[in-house]
Image (cartoon, rainbow, N blue to C red):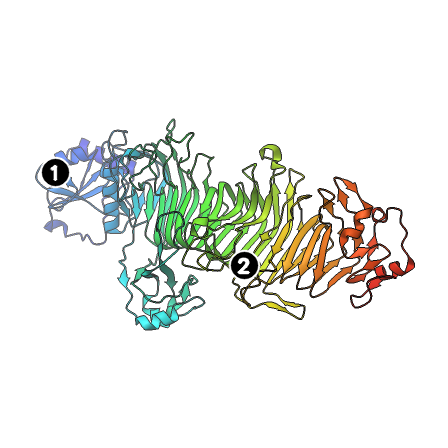
Amino acid sequence: MENHSNAYTRRKMLGALGLTLAAGIPAGVSAAPAAARPDTAGAIYPDVASLQADKKLKTGAFAQTAGYHKPGDGGGALYLVGAEGQVNLENGLKAALVPGTAVNYRMFGAVCDGVNDDGVQIKAAHAFANQHHLPVVQTGGEFWLKQTNGIQIQNSVQWGQTIFHIDEQYNVKNASRFEVISREKPRQVEVDKAVLLNKLKPGVLFIPELAPYTNCLVFAVDEKDRIGLRAGYGGQSWAREDFFYVEEHGRIIGDLAWEFKDFTSLMAYPCEQSWLTIEGGTFLLSGNNPGKADGKKYDGYWRGGISITRSRTVVREQWVGLEPGATDISMNPRAGFYTLTRVFDVALEDVRLIPYEQDREGTARDVPAGTYGISCGRTLKARFTRVTAEGGPVHWGVFGTNLNKNFIIDDCALNRVDVHFHCWHLYVRNSRIGYRGITVTGGGDLFVENTTIAARTFISFRPDFGAKWDGDIVIRNCKLIPATNGETGILEFVPQDFTYNYPVGFGRTLRVEGLTIDFRSVPGNADGKVCWLMRMAKFSRMSNGERMFFPQTLVFKDIVVEGRETGVRLIQLPTPQDFRQSKKGGVKDGLLQANATLLFENVQLEPLTEGVHLLVNASPGKPAMDEYALFPEVRIVNCPGVSVNMRGDASLRIERSEVNTLQAALNGELSLDNCHIRPVLADEKAVVADVSGGGGASFTNCVLHAPVVNGRAVPSKVDDYGFIRLNKQLKFNHLNTRLAPDALGGRKLSPAFVGMLKSHHELERDTLS
């Protein structure tokens, strides 16, 4: 007969916990008739130790615990007694955890005392959840991860306000603390190689032969074809590799970048048909990553945090930082707290983490390689939204990536965005990029909008991989805050003279519209230091004969400088004849067939007495290599104080601008419309102007001023323009050309000369008798 006191206690506990024995029993556990089974009415135990001590439990009995270590600690669970299970009983049987709707870490005995390695119990919890396809729900508490790594996650996780203390001295190289993995296995693509080689090329949208691999991320690799040779790194290179996602009927997602001569590997990685989400969690790091404390050599990259190799995974609402009072003392690089590899459509949302320290004061404590908070490799459609990872000069870039396509950054605050080799389509919106800026190479779309960058340059294209971008560049409504008082610029394309084994160039099209360069926080405002729209190499052909390419459309519009008087300079193209464009060009009968158009409009320029803002200087002794050389058509609109030196196969049109220096010996057309021409010279011997145009030179509604030497107008030097001598000669085509009062110097013009200024054609006499 049951003891009434015990029965009351059991009923009270059930009422308090809101539990029933039926709740949590899976559909697969059938209930036998009451007369045919042992006592399964169930018992409620305060903790697992009490359950283990009950020698009367029989096979088939269900047992409920009110906690794992003590009642109410969150580890309460339902068990089935039998020959197998997680809990050993004193009578020789075992108690098997009955799968319910979710599991948590306390159900597996996590101690949470700062001494126990709770990773052991956490790993067991995820293994159980993976086996039974259950989510892990642990929305509170503190857990300490010490020597445990490789905790595999295959189901969604809710961490809420849970805090994880990670002892980094136990980080390893071959496993992260948590590993989000796929249940699917990769397989070889069985398609006729010749057919695929013929179809796998840029611009292809459908490959019907790949329809059997729908919902797969496919990787094509030719290890024998080495590209992306890395300058300065002793023979490092990459295999020619491309990857894409296959939709229905062989529709290809992920624009192809390469053509292949052969494949050494063709693998399909199936993507899940559901989303795995990991929500919440705070991660406090000890900062003492292992490895030799050398500062010059390192043992490779160490791993920690969360790695993701499962497609369609979202991580959100997490906070990553150092333990209170801890500092980052690691002498070896980390591979990334978040590491994304071979995945399609993954996202980090509402995450705060830190870049790791690398360049500490002095040199003895420097980490001898890049060390990263986020690593991405071979990802397609990786999305980062409201991610914060800022730092100062001591921190390395938070991103360390290679081979990323459709890379999306939105509403983030990051200290750097970096893709070493082969980024294809990068979109940065509504973000703030800090000290180390954006450094990339690759191609496709490079769109940056409504974004502020506080770095030496707005975008630096990595010289070790050729400083290349083989695609379209668009920058709109952005701001650059130079993080240096030295030379700076908006775009930096400065490759090394090196064999990279792929085409190197500076974008197929390039548009920068609405950009402010704010010097107010720069020491001394960097006045006197040059700021370029584009910093470029002084060569356009490598020593090996490889020719670089230049954008066929280039636009810089509405460029404003704040915080200093000095504006910007434009670009220098000292050897346009050596470029290799995608379209033909040339000059015939004074008519330029341009294969590139350059527009500079509303650009605030640096006042110059020496040097020029724009240099396009094809040496007369070095003609264009062929019809694919660069033959530019240049327009400068509303740019006060512009100085230009252009020679060779090009045309130039300047509108509504003040022209300070004009040296234009062109085989194409030269046109000035509604301009003020006012040379500003460093000394009396400087060239005032040098103008000629094989396609004609035209001045429409222009005003000629006296040249200014050392701040003083010198009317006598008007005759040094070369195309005008007052009352004597006027060359080229003129319509309503005027002379400013300072140009006359008290001299009066003859009616005949005034008539020439009003209207003069180059076929008419250019001198007055």
Instruction: Pinpoint residue 617: horizontal percent, then vertical percent.
Output: 61, 56
* 335 with respect to 624 (left or right): left
Q: CA distance from mark 1 to mark 2?
A: 76 Å
Q: Is residue 540 visible?
A: yes
Quadrant of the image containing the N terminus: top left
The disc placed on residue 89 is: 1
Front residue of 158 and 50: 158
Q: Quadrant of residue 736?
A: bottom right
Q: Earlier in the sequence, mark 1 or mark 2?
A: 1
* Residue beneath the point at 91% across and 59% down: 751
Residue 611 in the image: above or below residue 140: below
The disc placed on residue 395 is: none
Instruction: Pinpoint residue 546: horizontal percent, then vertical percent.
Output: 46, 60
* Count of numbered tags: 2
* 544 with respect to 330 (left or right): right
Instruction: Pinpoint residue 599: horizontal percent, then vertical percent.
Output: 64, 57
Which callout, 1 or 2, points to the residue nearer the camera?
2
Which class describes the residues within 10 Å of circle 1: few (<14), some (14-19), or many (20+)?
A: many
Q: Is residue 76 visible?
A: no
Q: Amino acid at mark 1?
A: Leu
Quadrant of the image containing the C terminus: bottom right
* Residue beneath the point at 21% across and 34% down: 47
* 691 with respect to 424 (left or right): right
Disc 2: which residue: 550
Callout 2 secondary element: loop
Front residue of 473 and 712: 712
Q: Amino acid at mark 2?
A: Phe
Instruction: Pinpoint residue 686: horizontal percent, then vertical percent.
Output: 71, 46
Q: Quadrant of residue 338?
A: top left
